[in-house]
Image (cartoon, grey):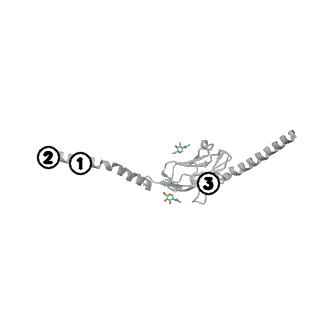
Amino acid sequence: LQHNFNNCQQICCLFLELTVSVVCFFLSTGNHHVSCPTPPIEAEEGDVAELQCRLDPSVDLRKETLDFTRADINKEVVHAYRHEKDQTDPQMDQYRDRTTLIHEDLIRGIISLNISSLNLTDSGLYTCYVPDLEASCTMNVTVGDLFFISPQHFLIFIQELRRIRGLVPLLVLVFFSLLLSSLFSESW
Ligand SMILES: *[C@@H]1O[C@H](CO)[C@@H](O)[C@H](O)[C@H]1NC(C)=O
Ligand SMILES: *[C@@H]1O[C@H](CO)[C@@H](O)[C@H](O)[C@H]1NC(C)=O
Ligand SMILES: *[C@@H]1O[C@H](CO)[C@@H](O)[C@H](O)[C@H]1NC(C)=O
């Protein structure tokens, strides 16, 4: 009887393990999401832009298929990574030799793509996609020419102006003392 009981216990345990692993399997697929930075990424012509998206929860992505595409240009490929290698064939000519996927980050579930020698035509929407996990997100990249002033830059400028407003009385004082001293020196 004891023997039978042990057998039953083993079978029950096996059954439980199976159920748990099946549930885990379903939870682990499709339950990941990728997050992209929400404010537009701003960069200047000629600079490097770093496009980064993160898997949550984190997964080792080295063996995954990964794609960066232009959501606003027929999902054309900016950078592709398959079978643990960067693939140049599907890539748009516009991005040839300008993209670097940072492989060391993949193990931590971070997909970082550097695009160098930025051109105004690189402004647009970029989708970061992990097909096997059905996870994707889209980010907005704005490339400005060197004299480009973004709304954010303008706000910073206004804040700076406000910050130095406290100096105005001091500046007025300096101005008047200079004026007075010049008047005095004239009357001498
Ligand atoms: C990617 O770009 C960032 C920001 O410009 C830079 O700090 C980093 O060194 C670059 N990494 C590579 C591998 O080019
Ligand atoms: C930007 O890209 C366009 C189209 O690819 C090209 O005609 C132009 O010369 C590029 N501009 C610079 C500054 O590289
Ligand atoms: C992307 O950002 C630019 C600059 O902030 C903005 O003008 C544009 O409307 C944004 N595009 C989308 C689709 O959000």
Q: Which residue is mark 2?
A: 186
**Across the whole image, how many numbered discs are drawn on residues?**
3
- Describe residue 98's horizontal placement relative to residue 59 as left or right: left
Quarter containing the N terminus: top right
Quarter containing the C terminus: top left
Residue type (three-letter) at the residue carrying disc 3: Ser
Q: Position of residue 67 (x, y in %)?
A: 63, 52
- Describe residue 53's horizontal placement relative to residue 24 as left or right: left
Badge 3: residue crowd in 10 Å (few <14, some 14–19, many ≥20):
many
For label 3, the SS is strand
Q: Is mark 2 within 8 Å of ligand 3?
A: no
Is residue 150 at least partly visible in the picture? no
Badge 2: residue crowd in 10 Å (few <14, some 14–19, many ≥20):
few
CA distance separating discs 1 and 3: 59 Å
Residue type (three-letter) at the residue carrying disc 2: Glu
- Mark 2 and mark 1 residues within 8 Å of each other at the beta carbon: no
Q: Which residue is mark 3?
A: 136
Query: Residue at 27% across / 49% down in the picture?
Result: 169
Q: Is mark 1 within 8 Å of ligand 3?
A: no
Number of the label disc, if any, that sits on residue 175: 1
User: Which residue extends farthest front?
Assistant: 1
Marked residue nearer the N-terminal end (1 or 3):
3
CA distance separating discs 2 and 1: 17 Å
- Describe residue 176's horizontal placement relative to residue 160 as left or right: left
Q: Position of residue 186 (x, y in %)?
A: 14, 46
Residue type (three-letter) at the residue carrying disc 1: Phe
Is residue 64 at least partly visible in the picture? yes
Marked residue nearer the N-terminal end (2 or 3):
3
